[in-house]
Image: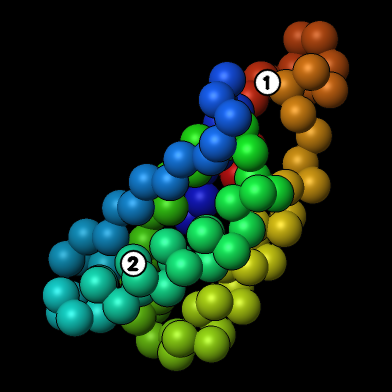
């Protein structure tokens, strides 16, 4: 699951929540974190101004590295195309995108 909110900074920030309940082995948790951070680094210029939190779900450890990178690259691109806070209609829910 990906949670995102705009920030007023000139750079994006990333938070990872990968618990033992969702990914049992620490080796797998660390592999997943490395892959997510790497794809984030490749797309951080497109994500300027976002605070992003990734919450791992069961089954994430079943993906191999190329598939994991592909899935997160899609998420980053989708988030970079999201409308900004200024484009939100008045009265609509503000700044939380999933």
Task: Please state which of the two labelled residues, at mark 2 or mark 1, is closer to the viewer.
Answer: 2
Circle 2 Cα neighbour tier, 10 Å, few/some/many (<14 / 14–19 / ≥20): some
| Rendered residue at 61%/78% (across/down) | 70
Left or right side of 41 for 97: right
Q: Are marks 2 and 1 in contact (CB under 8 Å)?
A: no
Q: Quadrant of residue 90?
A: top right
Q: Quadrant of residue 89?
A: top right
Q: Secondary structure at mark 1?
A: loop
Residue assigned mark 1: 93
Left or right side of 73 for 40: left
Viewer-side residue, 79 vs 24: 79
> From this viewpoint, is residue 34 visible?
yes
| Rendered residue at 59%/30% (across/down) | 10
Which quadrant holds the C terminus?
top right
| Rendered residue at 76%/10% (across/down) | 91
Q: Residue furthest top?
A: 90
Q: Quadrant of residue 85?
A: top right
Left or right side of 34 for 92: right
Asked if residue 51 is positioned above or below residue 59 in the image, the reply reads above
Q: Secondary structure at mark 2?
A: helix
Q: Position of residue 94 (x, y in %)?
A: 66, 20
Residue 54, disc: none
| Rendered residue at 79%/18% (across/down) | 86
Number of numbered tags placed on the structure image: 2
Q: Considering only order in the chain, which callout, 1 or 2, is on the residue closer to the N terminus?
A: 2
Asked if residue 36 is positioned above or below residue 13 in the image, the reply reads below
Q: Position of residue 54 (x, y in %)?
A: 43, 53
Q: Position of residue 17 (x, y in %)?
A: 30, 53
> From this viewpoint, is residue 96 visible?
no
Residue assigned mark 2: 33
Left or right side of 72 for 53: left
């Amino acid at each position: 699951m990906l949670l995102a909110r705009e920030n007023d900074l000139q750079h994006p920030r990333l938070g990872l929540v990968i618990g033992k309940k969702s990914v049992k082995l620490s080796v797998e948790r660390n592999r997943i974190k490395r892959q997510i951070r790497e794809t984030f680094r490749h797309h951080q210029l497109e994500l300027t101004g976002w605070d992003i939190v990734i919450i791992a779900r069961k089954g994430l450890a079943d993906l191999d590295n190329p598939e994991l990178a592909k899935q997160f690259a899609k998420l980053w691109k989708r988030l970079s195309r999201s409308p900004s806070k200024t484009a939100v209609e008045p009265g609509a829910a503000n700044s939380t995108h999933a």
